[in-house]
Amino acid sequence: MRRIVVVGAGFAGVWSALSAARLLAEHRGEGSDIEIIVVAPRASLDLRPRFYEPDVATMTAPLGPLFAAVGVRFVAGTVEAVDPAGREVAFVDEAGRRTTLAYERLILASGSRLARPDLPGLGEHAFSIDQRDEAATFEAHLHDLAARPPSAARNTVVVIGGGFTGIEMAMELPARLRAILGEDAPVRVVLLEQSAVIGPELGDNPRPVIAEALASQGIECRLETSVTQIDAGGVRTTAGDRIESLSVLWTGGMRASDLTRCLPGERDALGRLHVDRHLRVPGAPDVFAAGDTACAATDDAGNHTLMSCQHALVLGRFAGHNAAADLVGAGLLPYAQERYGTCLDLGPWGSVVTAGWDRAVQLAGPDAKATKRFINGTAIMPPPPVRAEALAAADPLARVAART
């Protein structure tokens, strides 16, 4: 039995597996001896873009019934290494046993992790919302603040990093803190950004909208400022002052999965593998990359994928199709995703929706909130465990057509 192994059960991994299953279903004779295996710690999709929301423990979707419906085998384990020469992955299973799994084609969809620099006190005293368990720990910590005596430190949250995640989380915090500490509590949220502007990666066009929303919630934005030290009682900033806080949240940037280092090839500044237009890793011809492990051209205008759910959903569909097509001798599809948009949640103020790589504002305020709710509650969700419906949803060309 030949194997397509998918490493990771995030957005790119799920859609890679579904798309590969779809291609094999269309080529029953050629693909009858091919099995698709997904290796990940759990058969569930963590809804990572929603980890800034409350009730984060519920932000997950089961995958077992879906994989069973389309004939994908799930193996619970954590992949520790990839051997492209030997065409196998090494992983630790649920029982702690180390074993290997051979493949004919591999799809690396192992995602990314929050970058954690060697900053004094970061590991011991800062929270994050990068993974679901970390976000749940932070949420529980906020609720535990109500049992502490009132103080400036108790009532203050410092969010380090004014990017997408930092902004969305900061906008949630004033209302959430008042719900926990009392509506009259003098809560304070301080957002630190080392750049000269808020949301530097979001561009100039939505910035006035974001600034208005942050001001509406009383969030203090300190630009060109980061931290030099974090301790149990607060942070010391690069400006030389100290902010007393029992709740320090680190959101400072992402890095691709360490498994990318197992493969030969060029990487970008985030550790992502450069891939060709079919999402193949040039230095490892049996390996395709998708999601946050891949740096792929989205068009012919010089734009490349971001570490975003928006790109992962489509990258997965193309990677799965191409990995399976490569085995059965069918045509590979060049990945393209020319349309680009963003939708940033701005808490009680609303949201902002932009279009294009220049991020022209299309909608802002309460009217844009419905778009964000649709994305979070519908667009990013896996399909129901119905074979025909799931396979149809995995068609990469249908998805491209729907977005153009």
Image (spheres, helix red, strand yellow):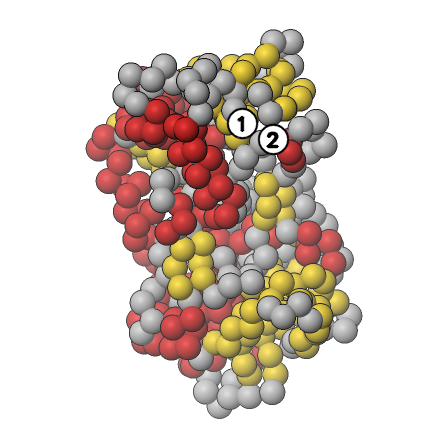
Q: Which quadrant does the N terminus fall into?
A: bottom right
Report the residue at 49% width, 18% height from top: 153
Q: Which mark is residue 208?
A: none
Q: Nearer the viewer, residue 133 or 162?
A: 133
Seen in the picture, residue 141 relative to 193 is either above or below; the reply is below
| Disc 1 secondary structure class | strand
Looking at the image, do the residues carrying marks 1 and 2 touch, with CB atoms under 8 Å apart? yes
The image quadrant that residue 174 belongs to is top left
Please indicate whether residue 11 sits to the left or right of residue 234 in the image: left
Which residue matches tag 2? 125
Query: Where does residue 185 sit, x and y in percent of width and height?
Result: 33, 17
Residue 211 shows in this picture: no
Badge 1 amino acid: Val
Please indicate whether residue 343 sits to the left or right of residue 225 in the image: left
Dot 2, how many residues are within 10 Å of its Cα: few (below 14), some (14-19), or many (20+)?
A: some
Please indicate whether residue 268 sits to the left or right of residue 225 in the image: right
Dot 1, how many residues are within 10 Å of its Cα: few (below 14), some (14-19), or many (20+)?
A: many
Report the residue at 28% width, 21% height from top: 183
Q: Residue furthest left?
A: 367
Q: CA distance from mark 1 to mark 2?
A: 7 Å
Query: Where does residue 7 sit, x and y in percent of width and height?
Result: 59, 64
Which residue matches tag 1? 248
